[in-house]
Amino acid sequence: MVKIAPSILSADFARLGEEVRAVDEAGADYIHIDVMDGHFVPNLTFGPPIIKCIRSWTELPFDVHLMIDPAQPFLEDYAKAGADLITVHAEADVHLDRSLQFIKSLDKKAGVALNPGTSANVLEYVMDRLDLILIMSVNPGFGGQSFIPASLDKIRKVRSMIGSRDIELMVDGGVNAKTIQSVVDAGASAVVAGSAVFCGDDYRATIGELRGALK
Ligand code: DX5
Ligand code: ZN
């Protein structure tokens, strides 16, 4: 069954702990945490202190999506704040392989995110270090954008590159009840959903709507 990772970017920041607990109780599989630095992406969110504050509100894995450049100097801070999975962008830093090795040395799961314009080929020589691949299906920076259809080809390509490896293939951006089926058909094993989950008051219903849209 496809995993659902609500993005707290669309949550009420004044009640972040309660929001995290609410999506946990509503059936989420991960908590997707979007960290933005106002440099790699044109928006700013939060960093390790806030992640640390919400850590005690759920036992679900924290899937931390770092939209920051550089990421490498801060990886340990995110590990200590409570990340279970740390995803860096292939376009950030210079030494992707070094960042992945470092995340693993911190005893955390390692992910790579690809912007819509980035080729899947950058994954080729780091594949064996990966626990997660995050295909961005919008240009990162904001919630509530429209799904970019060309992402489907990339999802299919990455699914075949993964082969029999145990790697989560997660898709992030514009996933809703209308787009989720095509994303899963292309090979995603997990989806991020920000606005689609937090748009209503009843998160069990909004997550249920996503699952219900799948055949
Ligand atoms: C975009 C973030 C996404 C975003 C998704 O930069 O990485 O995780 O919150 O939001 P929706 O699901 O609304 O497109
Ligand atoms: Zn994200």
Image (cartoon, rainbow, N blue to C red):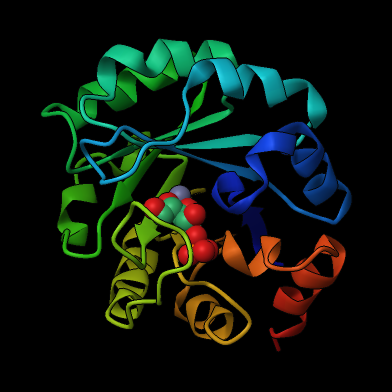
State the image coordinates of residue 120 (x, y, percent, origin top left): 21, 60
At x 36%, y 70%, the residue is 155
At x 76%, y 78%, the residue is 209
Of residues 66 and 41, the one drawn nearer to the viewer in this rendering: 41
Tally of marks: 0
Left or right of residue 189: residue 110: left
Of residues 34 and 200, the one drawn nearer to the viewer in this rendering: 200
State the image coordinates of residue 128 (x, y, percent, origin top left): 34, 39
At x 35%, y 79%, the residue is 152
Say above or below: 165 vs 70. Answer: below
Of residues 1 and 27, the one drawn nearer to the viewer in this rendering: 27
- Quadrant (top left/top right/bottom left/bottom right) for the N terminus: bottom right
Decide if residue 152 is in sight here. Answer: yes
- Quadrant (top left/top right/bottom left/bottom right) for the C terminus: bottom right
- Residue 103 location, quadrant: top left
Q: Extreme left residue here? A: 94
Left or right of residue 118: residue 138: right
Say above or below: 75 vs 190. Answer: above
Left or right of residue 117: residue 68: right
State the image coordinates of residue 213 (x, y, percent, origin top left): 70, 85
Decide if residue 170 is in sight here. Answer: no
Say above or below: 141 vs 201. Answer: above
At x 72%, y 50%, the residue is 29
State the image coordinates of residue 2 (x, y, percent, origin top left): 66, 66
Left or right of residue 98: residue 11: right
- Residue 54 location, quadrant: top right
